[in-house]
């Protein structure tokens, strides 16, 4: 099974608090929103995870550079599109 996480947007409603993408915000000292999502997908036996990235893509590339079961896809139009465009 393949799981998909959409993380291309800026998180404009929270951007006044943080300059990180919303999915990289910490829930506790070492666990971010995207870590939680990945953990939940792995708990239901998802073997391959696709993450659609856009805003601050380098942060995601650095975080997941050594993860074999995670593949990143860059939406170059992230700033002009929505989640449906990222899915396409």
Image (cartoon, rainbow, N blue to C red):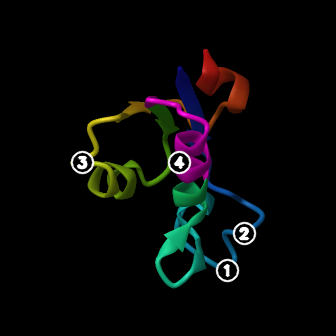
* Secondary structure of residue under mark 2: loop
Mark 2 Cα shell of 10 Å, populated few (<14), some (14-19), many (≥20): few
Specify whether residue 46 is painted magenta: yes
Structural distance between the alpha carbons of marks 4 and 1: 24 Å
Per the image, is 41 magenta? yes
- Which mark is first along the chain, 3 or 1? 1
Q: Does the residue at mark 1 contact the one at mark 3 (Cβ under 8 Å)? A: no
Q: Which residue is mark 1?
A: 17
Distance between the Cα atoms at labels 2 and 1? 6 Å
Give the secondary structure at mark 3: loop
Q: Which residue is mark 4?
A: 38
Q: Quadrant of residue 83?
A: top right
Looking at the rendering, which quadrant does residue 23 occupy?
A: bottom right
State how far apart marks 1 and 3 are (Cα). Answer: 27 Å
What residue appears at the point 66 percent right and 69 percent down from the top-left corner?
15
How busy is the neighbourhood of tag 4: few (under 14 within 10 Å), some, or many (20 plus)? some
Residue for point 62% across, 48% down: 40
| Pair 3/4: label in front | 4
Residue named by callout 2: 14
């Amino acid at each position: 099974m393949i799981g998909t996480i959409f993380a291309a947007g800026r998180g404009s409603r929270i951007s006044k608090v943080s300059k990180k993408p919303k999915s990289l915000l910490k829930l506790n000292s070492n666990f971010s929103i995207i870590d939680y999502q990945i953990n939940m997908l792995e708990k239901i036996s998802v073997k391959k995870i696709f993450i659609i990235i856009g805003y601050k893509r380098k942060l995601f590339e650095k975080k997941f550079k050594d993860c074999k079961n995670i593949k990143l896809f860059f939406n170059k139009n992230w700033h002009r599109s929505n989640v449906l465009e990222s899915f396409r």
